[in-house]
Amino acid sequence: MLNYTDLIYGHDKKVPTHQGNKCYINFDNAASTPPFKSVMNYLYREAEWYSSVHRGTGYKSQYSTNKYEAAREIMACFVGADLHHEVVIFTKNTTDAINKVSHYLGNLPGEIVIYTRIEHHSNELPWLKFPNICLELRNGVLDLELLEYLFATHRGKIKLLAVSGASNVTGYTPPIYSLAELAHRYGAKILIDGAQLVPHRPVNMYQPEDPRHLDFLAFSGHKMYAPFGVGVLIGPRSFFKNRSPSQVGGGTVKGIGPAGVIWAEPPDSEEAGSPNVLGALAIAKASEILTGLSWPKLIEHEDALLNYTLEKLSAIPEVIIYDRSRQNRIGVICFNITGNSHYSVAKYLADSRGIGVRNGCFCARSYVRSLLNISGPKAFNKSEFIKQETPGMVRVSFGCYNQFSEVDIFITALQDFIVNNL
């Protein structure tokens, strides 16, 4: 069994509980991961040379500019992007990245966006301003036969297929390369929300001429062991070129005058204002560390954690698990305990054992409601809606550093909660 705990900054920190101070157990990695120690040490060194990038002539400015631009190349290499065709844009996070694509989407041929039932709001809400179709699940997985039917029925009218590389609710990983081939066969583009996938599986965007090519990929540093919020958007350079940027300001123009504005070339046109230089360096360093860990070993370790936890939870009759599958998923498990709110369970885990989990709908309300078999109201009443208690679940999500011993503490805490509350 692998032990990556020494890689994690702050892993040995103790937190207050009702039973005294205890080492924090972070099972909320799908929300944010702690940073790697090596990333933090690297940033402390680089901060001594930090300065504004691109437009300064001083040594530190030139140094920071070179480091910042090198970070783009590292990110492109990390996911197999071709910088002759694609551009790497640093954003605030995945949400910001997807909204940038949404800003330009009217320039693609077609009318309709297809998104899926498993989407985080970040890959659902931006598409609702376009004619859209939500692809449903069949037996817990995306219905590819229905998808091909939709492409055939709306031939030439679908401009984009937007899909999460991994669900933040069940951990389900759709077959993104098969989806890419299908979208391209019907002349559509594909966007992958890689926020949950990229930290847990190697991703290859492939060359543009390859049917498996991923046209757009978005992901975040704070979910892959890099602090200082930064995201990455990779897409065709031509998609962003010679167009009014999604945000305007410093660095986005080549010239301005009475005759109008001449916009800068991408990526500069898409990075308005002073960029998050240290954030870019952090995600680049984190990507190198992840690659160096050996993907097969990391995947094996996280799969073992997932299977072990599912077995332990399945042995507790009061636990309702919302996806028991063992295949095609990352280490995310959602559950409830019969007769108890998701909030009370999560609070008990934190208060009694110092275990951090997430509870609620995880910014994926449509998917959570479908898993809970909650149908939407026929008529929307805002005041009544606000009064309702938010339905939801408890989510456990693993990082590369989590251990079986932590799962055992978690299971014991759940059993204690059940004894005290049923």
Image: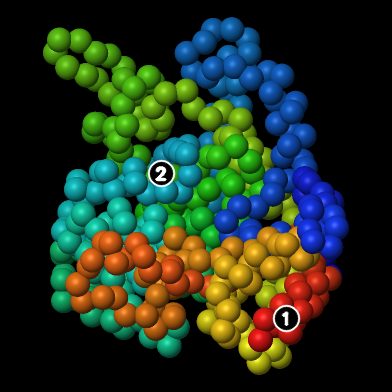
| Residue 331 quadrant | bottom right
The answer to whether residue 370 is left or right of residue 71 is left
Which secondary structure, mark 1? helix
- For badge 1, the amino acid type reads Asn
What residue do we see at 84% from left, 71% from top? 405
Q: CA distance from mark 1 to mark 2?
A: 43 Å
Q: Position of residue 106 (x, y in %)?
A: 19, 48
Q: Can residue 300 be seen in this snapshot?
A: no
If you read the primary sequence from the N terminus, does the residue marked by circle 1 or circle 2 appear first?
A: 2
Q: Are marks 1 and 2 in contact (CB under 8 Å)?
A: no
What residue do we see at 23% from left, 33% from top? 243
| Residue 309 quadrant | bottom right
Of marks 1 and 2, the one in the foreground? 1
Q: Position of residue 64 (x, y in %)?
A: 60, 21
What residue do we see at 22% from left, 19% from top? 261
Quadrant assignment for the C terminus: bottom right
The answer to whether residue 128 is left or right of residue 143 is left
What residue do we see at 61% from left, 57% from top? 199
Quadrant assignment for the N terminus: bottom right
Q: Nearer the viewer, residue 141 or 367?
A: 367
Categorize mark 1 by other alpha carbons within 10 Å: few (<14), some (14-19), many (20+): few
Q: Nearer the viewer, residue 24 or 385?
A: 385
Which secondary structure, mark 2? helix
Find residue 367 and name its label: none
- For badge 2, the amino acid type reads Asp
Find residue 96 and name its label: 2
Q: Position of residue 39 (x, y in %)?
A: 72, 39
List the residue tagged with mark 1. 420
| Residue 402 quadrant | bottom right
